[in-house]
Image (spheres, rainbow, N blue to C red):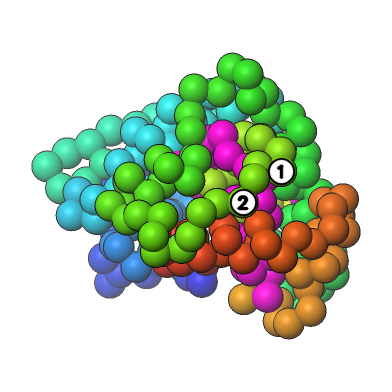
Amino acid sequence: MAAEVGKDDDVPSVVVALASGRPIRLAWQNELGGRTYQVGTGEQRRFVKWSPHVSGIDLTREIVRLQWAAAYVSVPQIVDQGRDDTAAWVVTAGIPGESAVSERWRAAPETAVTQIGLALRALHDALPVDTCPFSWSVEDRLIEVDRTLAEIGDPPPIDKLVVCHGDACSPNTLITDDGRWSGHVDLGDLGIADRWADLAVATMAAEWNYGPGWESALLDAYGITDDPNRNGFYRQLWNLDDGSAEH
């Protein structure tokens, strides 16, 4: 997924300017044309999330959520942001560690899945519901994608309201060399919802990324037993709003 950027790669000019001669590495790209670049190395590395306007992704949505969450959990610190006629971008400081789906951690799925579960529980425990200004409720998600409950049925009763990550797929947990989670990235949909809205996606992504059988290990690390009804409903909702495009 990550690749060194060479002379012939189509790196946006603003990313080249922000790099100021430092090495540029493509860290991630999505199906809508958005890209994330690592600029520099080591403790001074930065990440530039670049999103073309044609993608329809509003980076302001993620910026305000990062700014709010940073007071409570380990998330990227915003260094700079901007926009031009073709795209918007945000620059963040690097967090120690690498994606839970890096080659190293794919080869150690037990560690990766356990740390994802622990990290998600820590996020849910740390972010205060009472003061969170963002929602990720079933109703709001359906309105956003212009869909209806008739397509998936009535939601189950709320198990526990938490501030959800909003995209709890495996790549969005970072793990350090000592095998411990270090932070969360990609919080553009962070908001209040039943914790199973995150757990359903996290367990589904564990099987996407590490193979069958890792769902229970993630739930064990989080500290919860499976709830097939809630799990099934929130997976349907995730697939309905096509959120799985970046897993």
Task: Residue type at mark 1: give it.
Answer: Asp
Which mark, by number, is residue 156?
2
Please state which of residues 98 and 143 is positioned toward the viewer in this rendering: 143
Q: Is residue 190 magenta?
A: yes
What SS does tag 1 mark? loop
Please state which of residues 108 and 122 is positioned toward the viewer in this rendering: 122
Q: Tell me if residue 246 comes above or below residue 41 in the rendering.
A: below
The residue to which callout 1 is attached is: 159
Q: Where residue 132 sits: x, y (%)? A: 56, 23
Look at the image and tell me whether residue 157 can be seen: yes
- Say left or right for 132 vs 182: left
- Say left or right for 44 vs 151: right
What SS does tag 2 mark? loop
Please state which of residues 216 and 17 is positioned toward the viewer in this rendering: 216
Instruction: Give the class, few, some or many, for how many residues have Cα within 10 Å of label 1's Cα (few <14, many ≥20).
Output: few
Query: Which region is colored magenta?
Result: 178-207
Q: Where residue 53 sits: x, y (%)? A: 20, 49
